[in-house]
Amino acid sequence: MKSHIVRARSAAEDFPRAEHLATKVAEVAADPVEVTAEVAEMIVNRIIDNVAVAAASLTRRPVTSARAQALAQPYRPGPGRSGATVFGLPTPRWVSPEWAAWANGVAVRELDFHDTFLAAEYSHPGDNIPPILAVAQHLGRSGAELIRGLATGYEIQIDLVRGICLHEHKIDHVAHLGPSAAAGIGTLLGLDTETIYQAVGQALHTTTATRQSRKGEISSWKAYAPAFAGKMAVEAVDRAMRGEGAPAPIWEGADGVIAWLLGGTGAEYAVPLPGPGEAKRAILDTYTKEHSAEYQSQAPIDLARRMRSVIGDLDQIASIVLHTSHHTHVVIGTGSGDPQKFDPHASRETLDHSVPYIFAVALQDGTWHHERSYAPERAQRPDTVELWRKISTVEDPEWTRRYHATDPNEKAFGARAVVTLKSGETIVDELAVADAHPLGARPFARAQYIAKFRTLAEGVLDPAEQDRFLDAAQRTAELAPGELDQLTFTVSDEVLRRAPEVPEGIF
C-alpha cells in the first residue's frame, strides 16, 4: 500500500492531473490485477449477506416506496443492454440499472444489518454491491467481472474511510461511497483511467451532504442515502463514458471538498491505496453484523446478553454507565445530546442509533431481533423505559484509542459496562469486539452467512428459491455473461401483498 498525502490547493498552484487523488483512485480501478481466492470468497459471503437483509426488509414501507419508483422506470431491452433486476420481483421485470441500484440499495440498508468498516470514518461497504451488480446485469457481464468490480468498490471505499474523516465536519459517510461505486463500475467495465477519473469526480460532487440524516429525528432517508449515492455513481459513469467531465480537482481544488466541506486549507489527509499490481484486499478487513443495529451496538448487545445472568433482578439496577469511544458516545450515546434517543415513540431508525435503548432491551430479553426489538409496544414498555433512562455513556480515552488503532488486534468497538445496584454494589464487565467479529467469540464464516440468510429469508422466500439463490451465489465466479440475473430473488404475490400501500408520486 502507498500512502497519498491529500490537501487543498490554491487556484494558482501548479497541481498536475497525475497527482490528483481522483487520478490515483482511477489508476487503482483500472489496474488489471487478479482478485485473490480469499477476496473472491469473501465477496460471495457479502452477496449472500446483502440478499439476506434485503429479503427481511422487502415489505417495509421505505423499500416498498423505492421499489414502486423503480418499477416506474422500465427498461426495454436492446442489443447488449437488458436492464437490471429488482429484489423480490420476477426476473423478466427489468428496470433501468440506476433505478435497480436505487431500489435494491434501499432494501439492503433499511434494517442496518449488513457489513461495516470503521476507521477515520465509518461505512457499510456492502452498499457498493447494488449499483455494481445492477450495471453488470444490464450490460451482460460475467460473475468473474462482477467480482473484480466489487473488489475495487470495497477497496476504494475502505481506503477513503481509513484516510479521510467526514463526520468530524458533519458530512455524511456516503460521500466515500459515490466515488467507490463509480470506481468499481469502472473496473467492471474495463474503462480507462481518464473515464474513471471523471466518473469518480462527478460521483463525489453529487453525493456530498450533511450527516443530519443520522442525527436527531432519524428518518427513512438513512436507508435512502446510500442508495442515492449508488444511483448517482451509475449516472456519473454513464456521463463520463459519453465524454462529459467532472469538477477538478474535486478533493483538492480551491473550492473543492477538502477546502470547504472538510478540514480546510490547513488540513492534510493520508489515503492508503494499493500500488500497481498489488491485490485489492480491503474487504478482508471488514465485518458483518449478527444483530440489526448500528455496528457500535454489536459488542454492547453481546455484553448485555452476557451480563444479564450475573446481574439477576434488573429492578435492582440504579444506573448503568457504558465507558466507550468518543465516536460511540457522540453518535449513538448520550454524548449526542439527542433527547430523541430516549423517546419511546421514536422512529426505528432513531432507536437503532440509541445504545441506551439497545442495551436495555438486550439486558431484558437476552436476545436481539430485527423487528421485535424495535416494535412500538416493545419500546414503550414501562419497565423498559425505566431501565433505558438509567443508562448513559461516557467517553474513555482508551476506548477511543482502540477505536482508531491500525493494528487489527488492538482495534475495538466495544465498551466497559459499570452497573450500580441500589444496594451500592457494582458489577463490571467489558467486551472489545462483537462475538461475530473476526476476532470475536463466534466469528462469521460461510456457514454463518448462510444461516443468517436462512433465518431472514424464512417466510419470505420459498425454500426452493432459497436453495436456488444460495447455489447461484456460491457459483458467482462461474456465472457466464448474461447469467447474473440469478443473483436476485423472487417472492410470491402473497408476500408482496404484505407490503403497505404507498401513495402515488410523480412517476
Image (cartoon, rainbow, N blue to C red):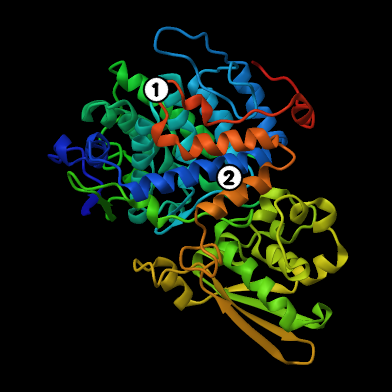
- Residue 417 x/y as whole percent: 62, 78
The residue type indicated by label 2 comes to: Ser
The residue singled out by tag 1 in the image is 481
Residue 173 can be seen, yes or no:
no
Q: Quadrant of residue 277?
A: top left
Q: Of the residues shown, which amino acid type is indicated by label 1?
A: Pro
Q: Is residue 488 left or right of residue 129?
A: right
Is residue 450 depicted above or below 362 in this figure? Answer: above
Label 2 and label 1: CA atoms lie apart by 38 Å
Q: Is residue 79 above or below residue 323?
A: above
Q: Is residue 493 above or below residue 228?
A: above
Q: Secondary structure at mark 2?
A: helix
**Looking at the image, is mark 2 or mark 1 earlier in the sequence?**
2
Image quarter of the N terminus: bottom left
| Residue 392: image location, x then y, percent | 66, 72
In the picture of the structure, the residue carrying the numbered disc 2 is 213
x%, y% of residue 251? 30, 41
Q: Residues within 10 Å of mark 1 (few under 14, many from 20)?
A: some
